[in-house]
Amino acid sequence: MESPKPISFKEQRVRNMTHLYYSRPEVQKAMFEFSKNREISSQYFDGFGKRPDSFEYLGDVMAMVQKGTTSFHCSEELWENPLDIVTGMSEEQANELRIGWDLLIDIDCKWFDYSKLAAKSIIEVLEDHNVKNFGIKFSGSKGWHIIVPWKSFPKEVGGTNTKDLFPALPREVVGYIRFEAEKNLRKKLPEDFYQQFKDVKIKKGIRCLECNEISESYTRVDLSCQSCKISEIRRLNESDHKKYPCPTCKRELEERGRNVITECLKCNSTSDASDTRKRKGNFAEVIEEDLFELMGLDILLVSPRHLFRMPYSLHEKTALSSTVIYENEIDNFQPADADPMKVEVRNFMPDVEEGEASELLIQALDWHKDEELRVGKSTEKATGKFADYKPIKLENLSEENFPPCTRNILKGISDGKKRAVFALLNLFRSVGMEKEELEKRIYDWNKKNPVPLKEGYIKSQLIWSYRRKPIMPPNCKEFYQGFAVCTPNDFCKIIKNPVNYVVRKNFVENRKKKEEEKKVKRAENDKKKKDNKKTKKESVAKNCNPEHNKF
């Protein structure tokens, strides 16, 4: 019979502490309250318990500790019932179970003082975007966790439930935060910072001499079709050698050349790498670094069913508590302040205003859209029933050609404004309305509403919509009856979707217009023929007049 594995001094110390520490009622309550609607997992020093799991009762915390649990971890995602989660479930199944998600920024760095600077830089970004309420806690080792609650975000973006946009949307928000936070972090570095990291391999870049920001490069590729005599320029990643078809004849476009362009996003300075003189005039030849990568700071841990250490859970490596602190305590905080038997229990989840992170979300979407355009990435593809739908370009589009439901919406409505935005956006895009006209119509409509939607909400819907392939608006009747704008006429009886209505009406109106134009043209031609005939008769009569010919 094998003898049991000896327990290390570190493990023994943690196990001796767990019963005493987790028996504190305020610790149990804090963990239980935070765990609501979250998947949790227990850790047995160096191994994890079953997944999914959850707390049903306050006493479950101590019950798990008595079975050997040393720490507790929980999900960023909020679930209707965490125990219904199934490993390998589809995106649709996850969306059905998920009721929301918190934005969790995980700051991890070997050097604690620099993790403090990173945390403060990120907090500045949040506050600059009017996010005033967020939670901060020590990770239990050398980093921090910052949480922006689900309640802070708008619940719908571009007609899609925000809860269903995990992990793509929070990743974009965290990416934007990192981009902005690096600017703040650079200002906080000590003078000898680069000397400290001189032997560390870093991600390289070029510094713009105009504004001192890190610039990046892309490849500009000139493409042409000799058959159709057309050409286009694409902005791609240097490694992208994808072939592109001619939009007219579908033959493969020929590559006539590619140049590496250095561009500063802040001041719009650009430089062709082949133009050495201009390059030196705008960009520094010295390299610069990605500060977050240089210091081992990784804040992009956003993934399905990702778990993080719960507030007031112990950390096996340090035997410290993952304790909640206030923003003004960051500078003076030391790991020793997280002594499990001395920590003051506070609420990690702050009280927030509904939608207070909307500005942050809008700016992140805007930034991400510019990033995609800059490096030539394609926008996200639409999925579902209308994934293959291609928009139509209608000419001479009149508001009279819109279905009654759309015209009722455009007069201004009291209820269902968010559903109306979704319907209008997809209708206007589906019929090929130009972006400038589309946005003007949307903003003008919103002003007519008795209680207009916030401009930030409208902007976020526009940004998200233009990142995706156009789809058809909802079919008739039920959707529009839901907010009392469906008042069908005889023409509605033969169509199923507002786009069909507009297309048919536009066709009928244009045909009538053409018929009218033909009638007018025929009348003009008949009149012209009649006048010519009359003129000819008068001329003949004049020539036959003896008085006229007597000479």
Image (cartoon, rainbow, N blue to C red):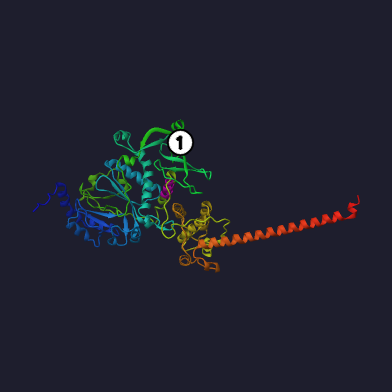
Question: Which residue is pictured at 47% across the width and 47% down the height?
Answer: 245
Foreground residue, 282 or 272? 272
- 5 with respect to 493 (left or right): left
Q: Which residue is mark 1?
A: 271
Quadrant in which the N terminus appears: bottom left
Using the rendered view, name the quadrant where residue 279 is placed: top left
Residue 237 drawn at (x, y percent): 41, 42
Question: Which residue is pictured at 32% across the width and 54% down the height?
Answer: 304
- 175 with respect to 477 (left or right): left
Q: Main secondary structure of the magenta part?
A: helix
Residue 155 drawn at (x, y percent): 40, 58
Q: Residues within 10 Å of mark 1 (few under 14, many from 20)?
A: many
Residues in magenta, as a range: 362-372
Q: Is residue 14 above or below residue 114?
A: below
Residue 483 drawn at (x, y percent): 47, 65
Using the rendered view, name the quadrant where residue 532 is placed: bottom right
- 486 with respect to 538 (left or right): left
Q: Is residue 546 above or below residue 494?
A: above
Query: Can residue 514 be found in the magenta stretch?
Result: no
Q: Is residue 477 above or below residue 144?
A: below
- Whether residue 402 is visible here, answered yes or no, is no
